Image (tube, helix red, strand yellow):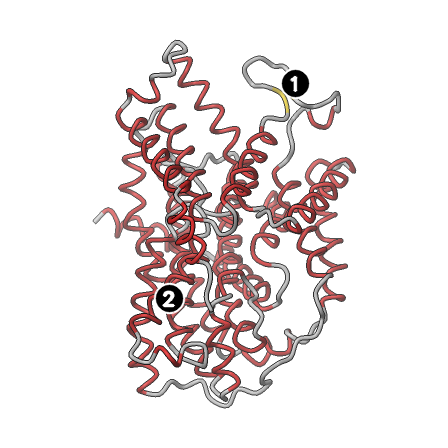
Amino acid sequence: MDLFNNLALGFGVAFTFDNIIYCLVGAIVGTLIGILPGLGPVATVAMLLPITYALEPTSALIMLAGIYYGAQYGGSTTAILVNLPGEASSVVTCLDGYQMARNGRAGQALTVAALGSLFAGCVGTLLLAAVAPSLASVAVGFGAAEYFSLMVLGLIAAVVLASGSAVKAIAMVVFGLLLGTIGTDINSGAERYTFGIFELSEGIDFVVVAMGVFGITEILRNLEKAANRELVTSRIDSLMLTRDDVRRSAPAVLRGTALGSILGILPGGGALLSSFAAYTIEKRLSKHPQEFGKGAIEGVAAPESANNAAAQSSFVPMLTLGIPANATTALLMGAMMIHNIQPGPQVMSSNPELFWGLIASMWVGNVMLVILNLPMIGIWVKMLKIPYRLLYPAILVFVTVGVFSIQNSTFAIYMMIGFGLLGYILSKLEFEAAPLLLGFILGPILEDNFRRALLISAGDFAAFLTRPVSGGLLALAAILLILLLSPRFRQKREAAFQED
């Protein structure tokens, strides 16, 4: 009964006029971002963070969350029609979605992507509503040592499960942790690594880092790419699925939803990993594996369901444990901190309207997205024709104004540009920016819990191992590190993110 009462509270919050409008705005912006290749939800959420200063916390999170899962929907449109993934997790959709479009079945591809995403999003949200209270009740009993060990496990899991080089991911996490130490030490009052620069005495604002390494870097990277986009079709004749389409896609949707719901909870690239894994599983289970890569409808249904389920379930660790599952949820976690709300198990009891209102808004948002993505497909097709050279100046102005509004300081703009150039150099060297942001967000919390645990134990480091939960979490982290050193595991890890 408690679950139903909580959901009733959540829908009461979500169905207020203001929150419906912000949910709609988030869904529309997310769809646009997913459709327009070259920006992505992380950069967009980073750019819109300054706007949330003027909003109520619940409304701000509802809008930002709508952008996140809306981008998963929109990314499928550009993947199917242009063979360009608007969002990273839509890469796999290109393989068969684009071929379906070339075969004159773009409407069916878009329909199965939208309906599969709706089902997966609703199931992922239901999982969040069901699992979150139990996880939060367990986490309430955590002490400083347990939180430190949990965050260590989360950061290592993010490295193990993320795509790309593990060594480079570890380096970026460490770099993020070091950036988080800049500023005034809370305990001693001493300034650390400020080099006498007054503006660094309060530390580096995470919005500046996020806008730099995602916003500015994405602009620079996209200016390198060719501007030509060849639309397969500008007219969608039919959106109706045949009986055979339903028979083949329904099991794929169910399997993709189940896989995405589980993998989305794990720190790292849950949505990306789940879409690759779902596609691989469908290819192995299919009675017609030779059709994959040539327009198999299962090749669209499974990854789209998986990445949308993962997008919803990725909120579980952020809301219940205070650990972001990916870069976007790290930004959402930062948005909560802007409003003096500490993510973690206390959110459910201290801010029940925010917690349950956000969950209820996801159901509302998923329905909105189906309405936006199917009947309005003609409008989205036209949006694909906008050249990037017209978009990036507006984006650049927007991020600059946003950063300046945070501290009313030009120094913040210089910092953002510096992080943008640094992010661009790191991207050319194939370093992922997401681990840096995770380390930067969790660094101060990690340090705080580490020092508190040592104060409580009178400086005894053994306290991290002798406390059962803390010791168990550190043991899991050690096992993951050992697996990471195994050549066989590394090969499987790399193969999980590759598809012929």
Residue extending farthest to the right is 410
Q: CA distance from mark 1 to mark 2?
A: 51 Å
Kindly identify which residue carries mark 1.
191
Q: Callout 2: 10 Å neighbours few (<14), some, many (20+)?
A: many
Quarter of the image where one finds residue 324: top left
Of the residues tagged 1 and 2, which is closer to the observer?
A: 2
At a point 77% along the width and 59% down the height, the residue shown is 393
Check disc 1 and give the amino acid type.
Glu
At a point 35% along the width and 88% down the height, the residue shown is 242
At a point 75% along the width and 66% down the height, the residue shown is 390
Tell me if I can see residue 13 in this picture.
no
225 or 198: nearer the viewer: 225
Q: Point out residue 323 in the picture as x, y percentages from the top left corner.
A: 43, 39
Tell me if I can see residue 320 in this picture.
yes
Quarter of the image where one finds residue 222: bottom right
Kindly identify which residue carries mark 2.
280
Residue extending farthest to the front is 487
443 above or below 220? above
